[in-house]
Image (cartoon, rainbow, N blue to C red):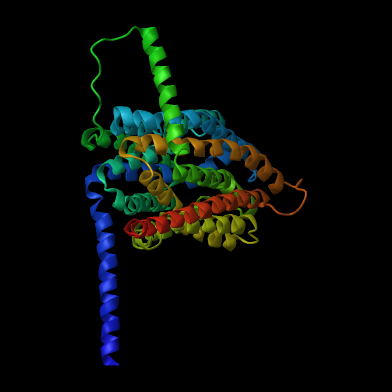
Amino acid sequence: MHAERTFYLTARFLGSKMHLAAWKCGFGELRPLVHLLLPLCVHWIAEEMTVSVLVDVITNALCPGNPTCPQAIYFNGTEQTVVGIFKMVVLPLLGQLADEYGRKPLLLLTISTSIFPFGVLVWDQSRAYIYAYYVLRTIAKILSQGSIFFISVAYAADLVHESRRAAVFGWITGLCSASHVVGNLLARFLPEKYIFLVSIVLLIFCPIYMYFFVDETVKRVPKSDEEPGCLSKTVDVLNRRFGTMRDAAGIVLDNPTLRSITYVSFFLKLGMTGITSVLMFYLKAVFGFDKNQNSEILMLVGFGSIFTQMLVLPLINPLIGEEAILCLAILASVAYALFYGLAWAAWVAYLAASFKVIYVLARPAIYAIVSKASSSSNQGKAQGFVAGVESIASLLSPLVMSPLTSWFISSDAPFDCKGFSIVCASICLAISLWHGCCLLKGHESKEEDDLETPFLNDA
């Protein structure tokens, strides 16, 4: 009996040591990325600290005294639709430019765009300035939303071995969640009049630090000495951009794994973007949530996301793989949508938010799957193409979600289900889950074939 107990304790000790070693290895891979991650974290803090207060600022400016504020919902939906239209072209283009001209110039461009819209809100928060904010924020999102992250992922893929990328991407998204927690803590305790001012200071710091300390990882091909004329050069650039976009589409569509993950990403983005675009306004209209309650929910998600992305993901990834993690995360997103859509009390919103702690694993899993299925020279193209497809989803979802949400939270709703639009979004998430299960099944079949091949060769 004593020998069995000793063996059991020894096995547990060795197992914990192995898991700790895997966790430390993932952390160690971040050392070459420190100068990238510091400004990224500051940028995420600056952006996140404005999220919970923006709902109150926009609602008070556009609809004084009206918590439902359909104008704010429609403005938000219009912004996302316009962003989605342009991102279909811009994101793949940014991915190609990052492969050709380097990661650093594109990171500097995209991370600088958020300074201008929040600068407007520092100056004034009246109706006219809210309109100006929406215009500038739309331009900023076209260039930066999604692109900052996938260019950073391509930068990390240049420096990290393929076998460690999922763990590193998990650490990066975990740091993003930690930054969101810090941002929400600042939003919770800072006076509202100082929030945008502090955000601007932090946003200005990011590109300055990145300019001086981030090293380039892509070696540019030297240009020819002969400079063509302006017109021929413009035509040549357009032809090359069209050709590289066609090549990027070919890279993804000719690869079964990349093709499947594109379907998964599209329907996942379609459902989650729709929910995100209306959620804060829905909670304010139905349960009277203000800046403080919004910050509490975001902090709850942030704290849990840190744990799952930085501790759980590196441990379970070697055991079950990125495909299984992706399916688990999408299943959590379905529960997330249903609990929010059918919420009958304010506390249910907190319960629904807890499922996002698991859903956040979808993003690093998708990055890892795309990265593994792409060659080193096509990282930006593949990530950019998938992001471009996601932008189509970002374009489509507000077209349905904004009017549907406004209708069902109003007194003219055909039946009493104020979260009906969010329940509808869960259907898209279920479709994404089905494609994810197909991807998982295909991965398992491929692994079985790889195991059988040596035996067939010996025979």
When asked about the image quadrant of residue 50, the answer is top left
In the image, 218 versus 209, the foreground residue is 218
Question: Which x, y percent locates residue 385?
Answer: 45, 35
In the image, residue 457 lies at what x, y percent? 34, 56
Front residue (pair 440, 88): 440
Asked whether residue 149 appears in the rendered view, the answer is yes
Q: Position of residue 104 (x, y in %)?
A: 29, 33
Q: Which of 165 and 375 is in front in this view?
A: 375
Q: Residue at horizontal 27%, vertical 65%?
A: 20
Report the residue at 24% width, 42% height from top: 35
Q: Which residue is drawn at 30% across and 43% down?
A: 157
Name the quarter where the C terminus is drawn. bottom left
Image quarter of residue 156: top left
Q: In this view, does 335 lie above or below 393?
A: below
Please say whether residue 295 is visible from this viewpoint: no
Q: Is residue 89 left or right of residue 104?
A: right
Location of residue 211 in the rendering, given as x and y in whole percent from the top left corner: 25, 32
Query: Quadrant of the image for the N terminus?
Result: bottom left
Give the answer, above or below, for where 135 lies relative to 48: above
- Total marks shown come to 0
Quick one: which residue is furthest to the front in this view?
Answer: 459
Q: Residue furthest bottom?
A: 1
